[in-house]
Each structure stands twice: as structure tokens, then as C-alpha cells.
């Protein structure tokens, strides 16, 4: 007669149960962090922008900024290759954003921006610099952070990160200066732009959201 063994005395089951318990304890004792450990943890978009704008976002854009003439030449030649090398984006089907530095002369611009006369850019393209209010442009968020949707409560809060970072730009870049007084002057602008068309047609203009504007010496 085959002897039956009570389930709790079976060696295989005991080992399996111990493994499950151990795994559960390991998960309980594990602290999960964001994919970008540089960023300070934050529960809201406002907290994220306040904690990371000066310490991480601005340095990231400044360190990775590519001269705008070189960048636009590369994008026009091969948009996908340029995006993979120089850009970053929210998702696979989203447009790339780029950190850039542009030297030129401020001129009269289109609505919501001041024009920037830059030499060396491809024919048919023009450059402008966004002025307040900056709205919901995601260029600073996408080019200057590794923030992802999963770090925040929902898509709305993730979008608000871009808005709150733009508010930081207004406070730190524009409030200390009279932008209109700089028309006609040589400047160096560091910031980010998104390679996308406002109308859905061919791209012929890029608008840089600045993290710094310096009058050329």
C-alpha cells in the first residue's frame, strides 16, 4: 500500500513555499526608484519642477546642447538618425526634442516669440525664441529630463511637468530681463526645441524655449 504523505511534510512543497515567502519578503524590503536616479523624487508636477529645474534640467540641457546650425543640418539630412543621436522624446511615435545653443541677433519675430537671425542654418528654415507665456511646450521636459509617465499619477500630471518647467523658465530667464530691449543685439541662447510642425505640414521654423539668454560680449 502506498503511504500518503501530508502536504506540509512534502519536501518539494516546503521548499517551494519557502521560496515564495522569501521572494515576497525581498519585494517588501525593496525600494523602487525612477529610471532616472538623478531626478529628485516628487509626487506632483510642481514639486518636480521646483526640485529639479536648476539642479538637473538646466545643467542637462547646457551639457548636451548642440550648435543649432549643426543640429538643423543633421536633422534635415536624416531626421531619424539625428533624433537617435541628438534627441529625446516622450514615446516612439512622438516628435524628438533637442538641446541646442544658438548664437545670433534678436530681431522682430512671430506671435509668441522673438526672432533669432542665425547664420549657417539650412535654406528654408528660420529660428525663433519663445517668450512668455510659454504654455504647454514639452521641449524642456523632453530634452532636459528622463521623466516618464509612470512616475506620476496620470497623463495630466505628466503633461503638467512640462507646464511647470516652463514656468520655471519664465521666472529664471525672463523675469530678470527686458526681452524687447534686446532686439538688435547679439545673443547666445541655450535651450530646447521640438522638431514638429504647428500646422502638420513641412517644417520650416523652430522655436527654442530658453534656459539661458546671454548678451554676447
Image: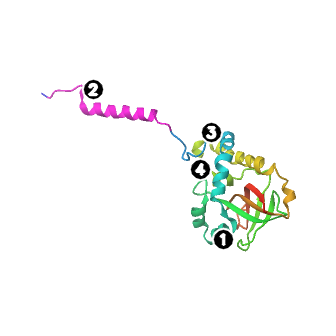
Quadrant for the C terminus in the image: bottom right
- Residue most extreme to the bottom: 123
Query: Measured from the top left, where is residue 19 in percent x and y?
Result: 34, 34
Name the residue located 37 percent from the left edge and 31 percent from the top edge. Answer: 21
Residue 210 on image: x %, y %:
73, 55
**Which coloring applies here?**
rainbow
Instruction: Assign a secondary structure to mark 1.
Output: helix
Q: CA distance from mark 2 to mark 1?
A: 71 Å
- Return the disc, 3 or 1, that comes first in the chain's sequence: 3
Q: Earlier in the sequence, mark 2 or mark 3?
A: 2
Q: Residue at x 66, y 71 (%)?
A: 73
CA gap, disc 4 to disc 2? 49 Å
Q: Earlier in the sequence, mark 2 or mark 1?
A: 2
Secondary structure under tag 4 reads loop
Can residue 196 be spotted in the picture? no
Q: Which mark is residue 73?
A: 1
Task: Find the distance from the CA under tag 2 to the CA under tag 3.
Answer: 46 Å
Which range of residues does the magenta coloring cover? Answer: 2-31
- SS label for mark 2: helix
**Mark identifier at residue 8:** 2
Task: Kindly report the distance in space between the C-alpha atoms of the residues bearing marks 1 and 4.
Answer: 26 Å
Task: Tell me the residue that label 3 is attached to.
Answer: 42
> In the rendered image, which residue does mark 4 sit on?
146
Q: Earlier in the sequence, mark 1 or mark 4?
A: 1
Estimate the spatial distance between the alpha carbons at disc 3 and disc 1, rounded to whole Å: 37 Å
Q: Is residue 125 visible?
A: yes
Q: Quadrant of the N terminus?
A: top left
Amino acid at each position: 500500500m502506498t503511504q500518503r504523505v501530508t502536504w506540509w511534510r512534502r519536501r518539494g512543497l516546503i521548499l517551494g513555499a519557502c521560496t515564495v515567502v522569501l521572494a515576497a519578503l525581498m519585494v517588501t524590503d525593496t525600494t523602487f526608484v525612477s529610471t532616472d536616479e538623478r531626478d529628485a523624487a516628487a509626487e506632483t508636477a510642481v514639486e518636480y519642477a521646483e526640485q529639479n529645474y536648476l539642479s538637473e534640467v538646466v545643467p542637462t540641457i547646457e551639457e548636451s546642447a548642440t550648435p543649432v546650425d549643426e543640429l538643423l543640418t543633421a536633422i534635415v539630412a536624416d531626421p531619424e538618425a539625428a533624433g537617435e543621436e541628438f534627441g529625446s522624446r516622450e514615446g516612439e511615435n512622438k516628435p524628438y526634442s533637442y538641446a541646442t545653443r544658438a548664437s545670433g541677433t534678436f530681431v522682430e519675430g512671430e506671435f509668441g516669440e522673438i526672432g533669432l537671425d542665425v547664420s549657417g542654418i539650412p535654406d528654408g528654415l528660420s529660428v525663433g525664441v519663445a517668450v512668455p507665456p510659454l504654455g504647454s511646450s514639452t521641449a524642456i521636459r523632453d530634452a532636459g529630463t528622463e521623466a516618464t509617465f509612470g512616475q506620476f499619477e496620470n497623463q495630466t500630471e505628466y503633461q503638467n511637468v512640462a507646464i511647470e518647467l516652463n514656468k520655471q523658465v519664465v521666472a529664471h530667464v525672463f523675469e530678470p530681463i527686458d526681452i524687447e530691449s534686446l532686439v538688435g543685439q547679439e545673443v547666445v541662447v541655450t535651450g530646447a526645441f521640438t522638431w514638429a510642425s504647428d500646422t502638420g505640414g513641412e517644417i520650416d521654423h523652430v522655436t527654442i524655449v530658453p534656459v539661458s539668454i546671454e548678451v554676447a560680449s
